[in-house]
């Protein structure tokens, strides 16, 4: 029986690696996900029926009930959620994983005796702390992304306080291990401290950096799972957790690169603090308004149009209208392309998912490095709900917080139409001089209604 | 420090696995197109739900009269399975969209 279980775990572990590998290529990604899911199912079934001989029916019943309840909840959320809400969802699910790890460690803490090895003790305690941090951190990230958590706390020396608190947690944990303090109350105190730190850790981080944080927290959940794996000497958890942990770090770094941020500056420097002051006093000139009919005329007689979709498009659920616009223009002989910034939307690749949802032909989506030289030849660039990723300050204002971030060079085009709901600043909280450019005209309004009007005008031409 | 050395020598296998798995994770993810970052993150997130195996073990090992352990284990299983099922299902939904393009 033991051998069978080990073989099952081995197979599951291999499916994780193969699945992850396949997830990295567009053609095989779906298969990869299925392979990994199959392995996970196998591991779960194996764990239930093969890891212990005699277990009361009551416990089997409870496990079955828990699986049913959780499975239904997870499934319902997954099929109901709007694709625009994807980053929040990943964060929420991730928080659940972290909470699960923390609870497991908490139960195991209760089983600690004076005979328990210090290393096991340390493993359990780190499980409690990391699980708790991931849980509360993910929930805050979730809240920040869906807008329910807004407050940007500004305490002087925030980072110092934060880091000292973290050091204090570690010190307390080390002390507990060294002294063999196993009172359940201490475990709860540590759990509470971890929860508080998770909140403090994510709260000051700016919204634009949130995907990086989610990716980092995702990686932490993997580490928590691996720690639990060490605890139970369970290879599938150990390897699965480490895979997620290291892959998560790589993904986090890749995202940071796309945004020209270092991991350190994301964690320790809150975005958008100083910049508001730096750019505020500058006179930026005046903006020029336009309307759907003028925009339609401009685009109708263009030969090259590039669409720059941003999160505003996603929020307004305008991904279907934009596809209609693109088809209409193509039918009129206009050459249309989409320029996708690596962090367009709220996560790298998020915009590709959204546009794929509305059936946009994959070959029309151009990545930043390929499309940037083409802006020179573009007659019209239509920016829909994007802001920071087209802000020229990234090129020419060393004082700007986004200075050095790779952007789409839309200012090289002949005409720029920017659709935005208002003149409010983007996620980075800074002004965008592109809007004051003499080539730019602003098409104010909700992306969906503005684009619908635009499509209507085009149809009449 | 002695504890650490003792741990490593007692758990040599685990230490090897730990280090090698880290490299596998890095290599497998390396040079992935930005297009796939979101599905990948979501898929990896589902994988981290493997912690559910631990939650199941907690319940199996619990004394049927130990309500606290059973209760905590129950919640841990529910949360873990939400992460697993939801994570894989949503990743599949995302990838489905990439597929129907042609």
Image: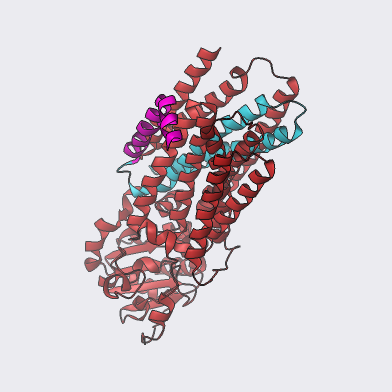
Q: Quadrant of the N terminus of chain A?
A: top right
Asked if residue B16 lies in the magenta stretch, the reply is yes
Residue A17, image quadrant: top left
Whether residue A73 is visible, yes or no, is: yes
Residue A185, image quadrant: top right
Q: A92 above or below A180?
A: below
Q: A135 above or below A123?
A: below
Asked if residue A231 lies in the magenta stretch, the reply is no
Residue shown at the point (60%, 28%) measured from the top left: A115
> A270 left or right of A136?
left
Residue shown at the point (30%, 55%) measured from the top left: A367
Residue shown at the point (52%, 64%) measured from the top left: A161
Residue A374, image quadrant: bottom left
Q: In the rendered picture, chain B carries what hue?
A: cyan
Residue found farthest to the right: B65
The residue stretch that appears in magenta: B1-29
Q: As rendered, which of A325 and A410 lies closer to the eye? A: A410
């Amino acid at each position: 029986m033991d051998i069978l279980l080990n073989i099952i775990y081995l197979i599951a572990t291999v499916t994780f690696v193969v699945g992850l590998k396949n997830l990295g290529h567009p053609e095989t990604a779906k298969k990869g996900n299925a392979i990994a899911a199959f392995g996970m199912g196998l591991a779960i079934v194996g764990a239930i029926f093969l890891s212990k001989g005699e277990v009361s029916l009551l416990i089997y019943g409870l496990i079955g009930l828990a699986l049913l309840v959780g499975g239904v909840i997870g499934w319902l959320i997954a099929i109901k959620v709007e694709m625009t809400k994807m980053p929040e969802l990943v964060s929420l699910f991730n928080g659940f994983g972290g909470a699960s790890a923390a609870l497991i460690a908490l139960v195991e803490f209760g089983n600690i005796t004076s005979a328990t090895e210090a290393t096991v003790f340390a493993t359990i305690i780190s499980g409690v702390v990391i699980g708790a941090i991931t849980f509360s951190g993910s929930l805050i990230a979730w809240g920040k992304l869906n807008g329910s958590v807004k407050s940007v706390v500004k305490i002087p020396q925030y980072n110092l306080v934060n880091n000292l608190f973290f050091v204090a947690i570690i010190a307390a944990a080390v002390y507990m291990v060294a002294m063999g303090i196993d009172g359940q109350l201490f475990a709860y105190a540590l759990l509470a401290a971890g929860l508080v730190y998770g909140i403090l850790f994510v709260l000051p981080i700016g919204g634009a950096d949130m995907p990086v944080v989610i990716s980092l927290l995702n990686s932490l959940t993997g580490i928590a799972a691996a720690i639990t794996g060490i605890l139970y000497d369970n290879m599938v958890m150990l390897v699965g957790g480490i895979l997620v942990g290291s892959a998560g770090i790589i993904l986090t770094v890749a995202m940071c690169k796309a945004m020209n941020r270092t991991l350190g500056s994301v964690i320790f420097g809150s975005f958008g603090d100083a910049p508001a002051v730096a750019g505020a006093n500058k006179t930026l000139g005046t903006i020029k308004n336009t309307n759907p009919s003028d925009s339609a005329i401009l685009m109708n007689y263009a030969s090259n149009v590039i669409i720059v979709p941003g999160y505003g498009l996603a929020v307004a659920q305008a991904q279907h209208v934009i596809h209609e616009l693109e088809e209409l223009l193509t039918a009129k002989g206009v050459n249309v392309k989409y320029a996708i910034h690596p962090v367009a939307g709220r996560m790298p690749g998020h915009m590709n998912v959204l546009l794929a949802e509305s059936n946009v032909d994959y070959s029309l989506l151009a990545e930043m490095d390929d499309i940037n030289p083409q802006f020179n030849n573009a007659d019209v660039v239509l920016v829909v709900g994007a802001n920071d990723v087209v802000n020229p300050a990234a090129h020419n204002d060393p004082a700007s917080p986004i200075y050095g971030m790779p952007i789409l060079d839309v200012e090289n085009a002949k005409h720029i139409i920017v659709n935005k709901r208002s003149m409010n600043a983007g996620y980075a909280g800074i002004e965008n001089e592109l809007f004051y450019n003499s080539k730019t005209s602003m098409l104010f309004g909700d992306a969906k209604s503005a684009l619908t009007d635009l499509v209507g005008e085009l149809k009449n031409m | 420090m002695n504890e650490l050395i003792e741990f490593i020598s007692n758990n040599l296998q685990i230490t090897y696995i730990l280090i090698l798995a880290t490299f596998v994770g890095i290599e497998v993810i390396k040079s992935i197109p930005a297009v796939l970052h979101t599905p990948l993150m979501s898929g990896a997130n589902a994988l981290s739900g493997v912690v559910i195996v631990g939650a199941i073990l907690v319940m199996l090992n619990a004394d049927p009269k130990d309500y606290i352990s059973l209760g905590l284990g129950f919640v841990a299983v529910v949360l873990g399975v939400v992460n697993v099922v939801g994570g894989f299902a949503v990743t599949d939904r995302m990838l489905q969209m990439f597929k129907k393009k042609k």
